[in-house]
Amino acid sequence: MDLTTLNDDDTNEKVIALCHQAKTPVGNTAAICIYPRFIPIARKTLKEQGTPDIRIATVTNFPHGNDDIDIALAETRAAIAYGADEVDVVFPYRALIAGNEQVGFDLVKACKDACAAANVLLKVIIETGELKEEALIRKASEISIKAGADFIKTSTGKVPVNATPESARIMMEVIRDMGVSKTVGFKPAGGVRTAEDAQKFLAIADELFWR
């Protein structure tokens, strides 16, 4: 589970507060997700509060999911230079809707190569709420996995429709059908705020992978 702040009005103070929130008596969150420029202050805060093991994730090609590979790669390299443990890159979903499958593969592959060289985890946000159709959600998931994604993720949280059980099932079915459930993860994002919300997605994973 991640704690996230990706707002236009984010400040050092808000990021510091998020770091404090990530430390709890019942266990720490796995990661925080913030904009790249806040990584240094977050790293310092996590260390000072005794939780250096909380990972720092950040975003690139976000939230628009454009199809400019050079810009996405430059942003990913910059995020790595800031010290990110994980990079969440937005898949060029509009290009896929328009029929261009290759640019998605090439963009994810370029970012994966940069991340792999630095031992940084790559999550690919496919923006299911904009893809909408099952075939497109399935195709974006397949392309991302073939290009090297460590995780596939539903949403940016910046569009009207974010993680839904229906889109989650499609994505997890792709992971199962491609035989990569031990190496590729799934992450619902956007609107998952309670234990009850999370349980809906855990139930699907239980059905597809653990029974």
Image (spheres, rainbow, N blue to C red):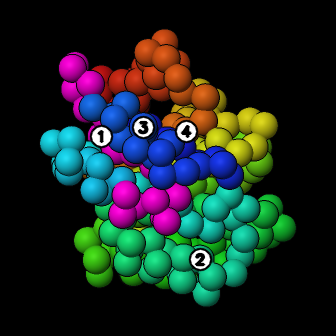
Extreme residue toward the left, this view: 50
Q: Locate the C terminus and report the quarter of the image it occupies.
A: top left
Question: Which one is closest to the eye, mark 1 or mark 4?
Answer: 1
| Type of the residue with mark 3 | Ala
Q: Could you give the CA–CA distance between mark 1 and mark 4, rounded to whole angstroms?
A: 14 Å
The structure residue drawn at horizontal position 36% and vertical position 24%, both measured from the top left corner, is: 206
Q: Locate the N terminus and report the quarter of the image it occupies.
A: top left
Looking at the rendering, the stretch of residues picked out in magenta corresponds to 24-41
Extreme residue toward the top, this view: 196
Q: Could you give the CA–CA distance between mark 4 and mark 3, rounded to whole angstroms?
A: 21 Å
| Type of the residue with mark 2 | Ala
User: Disc 1 on helix, strand or loop?
Assistant: loop
Q: Return the mark for residue 160.
A: none
Q: Position of residue 156 (x, y in %)?
A: 63, 48
Say if mark 1 contacts mark 3, CB within 8 Å.
no
Pointer 2: what residue?
72
Q: Position of residue 42 (x, y in %)?
A: 36, 53
Residue 129 in sight here: yes
Q: Could you give the CA–CA distance between mark 2 and mark 3, rounded to whole angstroms?
A: 29 Å
Please tell me how crowded label 1 is: few (under 14), some (14-19), or many (20+) other residues with Cα within 10 Å. Answer: some
Query: Can you say whether 197 is above or below 168 in the image?
Result: above
Query: Can you say whether 108 is above or below 10 in the image?
Result: below
Please tell me how crowded label 3 is: few (under 14), some (14-19), or many (20+) other residues with Cα within 10 Å. Answer: few
Q: Earlier in the sequence, mark 1 or mark 4?
A: 1
Q: Quadrant of residue 205?
A: top left
Please state which of residues 130 and 211 is positioned toward the viewer in this rendering.
Answer: 130
| Type of the residue with mark 1 | Ala
Q: Could you give the CA–CA distance between mark 2 and mark 1, rounded to whole angstroms?
A: 25 Å
Q: Earlier in the sequence, mark 4 or mark 3?
A: 3
Pointer 1: what residue?
30
Pointer 3: what residue?
17
